[in-house]
Amino acid sequence: MKPPKPATSPEMTWPQRFLIAAVLAWFGLLILGPAVALVRRAMEPGIGRFFAKLAEPDAIESLWLTAKITAAVTVCNTIFGIGMAIVLVRQRFWGRRLMDGVLDLPFAVSPVIAGLMLIILYGPRSTIGSRLSDMGLPIVYHLPGMILAGLFVTLPLVVRSVAPILEEVGSDQEEVASTLGADWWTTFRKITLPTIRWGIAYGSALVVARSLGEFGALLVVSGNIIGRTQTATLYVHDQVESFEPHGAYVMSTVLAGLSFGMLIALEAVRNRTHRQEYGAEESQDPSVERKTIRPTRRH
Amino acid sequence: MSSTSADRPVPLGGLLLRWSCLSYLGVVVLFPLTAVVIRALSAGPVRLWKEIVNPFAWHAIRLSLTTALVMVAISVVTGTATAWVLARYEFPGKGFVNALVDLPFAVPTIVTGLMLVALFGPSSTLGVVLSGFGLPVIYEQSGIVLALLFVCYPFVVRSVQPVLENLDPAEEEAAATMGAGRWLIFRKVTLPALVPSIVSGAGLSFSRALGEFGSVVIVAGNRPLSTKTAPLYVYGEVEGFNVDGAMAVSLVLLTCSLISLVAASKLAERQG
């Protein structure tokens, strides 16, 4: 699957070996070392203590809340992400460029600032916030606020994974289908959906990974009340603050393991997308590969 | 590209889809942003300026900018080197390294913080050795740079690597035939081709680093006028119910972040 490499002599010179060694050393010190150190710290008191810590009610509750938020965020942003990608690529209307720009804004906004925005809009002192909480629907410091924070932070991911594929494929097949009398829903189900399904899978996997690990926005929005509004990442923070490093290390290891799993899943999906979209041949156009493979990095 | 569907009037279903999607975008992204802008306008520029030049806020902003710049300077070199090694050489463990380059994107930022404390912290062997040399990392400003290096590691690698892999070897070979040395070829032929991707990776890293919170909160120790970065300051002010102060610093951060993203993409376009 790799593009042809420039001819390099099989025998490496010493400067080349030195460069490889330097890169490996840097990678080991910066990425691998810390990851291994974390797992070792979590396992230090023994595997029994590890699971005992994880089985504590606070830890279980926090994982459950994280699961709920992740599920809600993934469902909403996947459905609307597909919709927004279709609107963005297939429709021409006034304000489309603006929509394109606004879509990427969450990438430029610090998570803490995202939380601050929600507090300003829905906080107890704002008009909307106090109105909604009078109606029995408090947003900030409660689950809806945390879901909104997750939605904000992960909004671009599915759109940016699906839109390039839609653009690449073009609308010819969809045109044919509608000329043959298929209504838009049939066209979507039979033509569009099969083409973009791996893009959707890739985008939603990114959403899952990102919302599992979201911290800054949630910290600002949640008020951090134990048991009720504590997610797994907030639990880690809480354990650090209360000088319980072992609990923090244990939960961090679980989160790191989950995200590592997502990384492997993403790798698999990425290979599938590539194979499906471009067949067995190698893609000649580098931008094609970059668009499908690294959708999050398009700004 | 294909504009045939765009020229026809959009069917009702399409309009419905458009409006529901635009409303969703409005509720999730645009409303909160507008709320901040309205709130900022009602506070007035004088009030905001006072909040920005408050010594604590000013120090936090400067610290964020400096640490991000130092990180970008290091990351550009290490990232290009990593991309180069991954694209050009075969060596044992290459697949493993290539897969794990993305790890910082997948790992939650607060977990990143704990990883770094586990390896470099005062209770680890490495941490003790480092402080023995008078170079404590964790809870110091150098710790912030370290956290940013971890978090932003993939940006430069992943923007340079595909360009390097798809680079036409003919030019390099031509230069070599004409007797140019490796270093000269790299400087005069390869590097100029890589500059746009390096610049865009650097811009993304810088923007990300300015807003980084989770890892820094664990690693930096959060001391005002010493290791408190701008996002940490914003969080502290929100907790202390000083929304104007939080907002003023947020606006500065947002502006810097947007400028770096736009500048990087413009520069990359012009170079390319």
Image: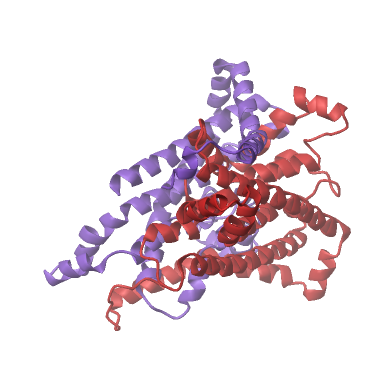
Placement of B125 over or under A17, stated as above or below: above
In the image, farthest residue toward the left: B178
State the purple chain: B
Q: Indicate the colour of chain A.
A: red
Depth check: B161 or B19 in front? Answer: B19
In the image, farthest residue toward the front: A180
At 59% from the left and 18% from the top, the residue drawn is B41
The image quarter in which residue B87 lies? bottom left
Depth check: A52 or A113 in front? Answer: A113
At 71% from the left and 44% from the top, the residue drawn is A218
User: Picture coordinates of residue A213 (x, y %)?
Assistant: 67, 54
Viewer can see residue B125 = no
User: Picture coordinates of residue B28 (x, y %)?
Assistant: 66, 37
Depth check: B123 or B64 in front? Answer: B64
Placement of B228 over or under A285, stated as above or below: above
Depth check: A37 or B139 in front? Answer: A37
User: Picture coordinates of residue A262 (x, y %)?
Assistant: 64, 64
Residue A132 left/right relative to A163: right
Viewer can see residue B76 = yes
User: Picture coordinates of residue B9 (x, y %)?
Assistant: 53, 36
* Colour logic: by chain
At 68% from the left and 44% from the top, the residue drawn is A151
Residue B236 left/right relative to B167: right
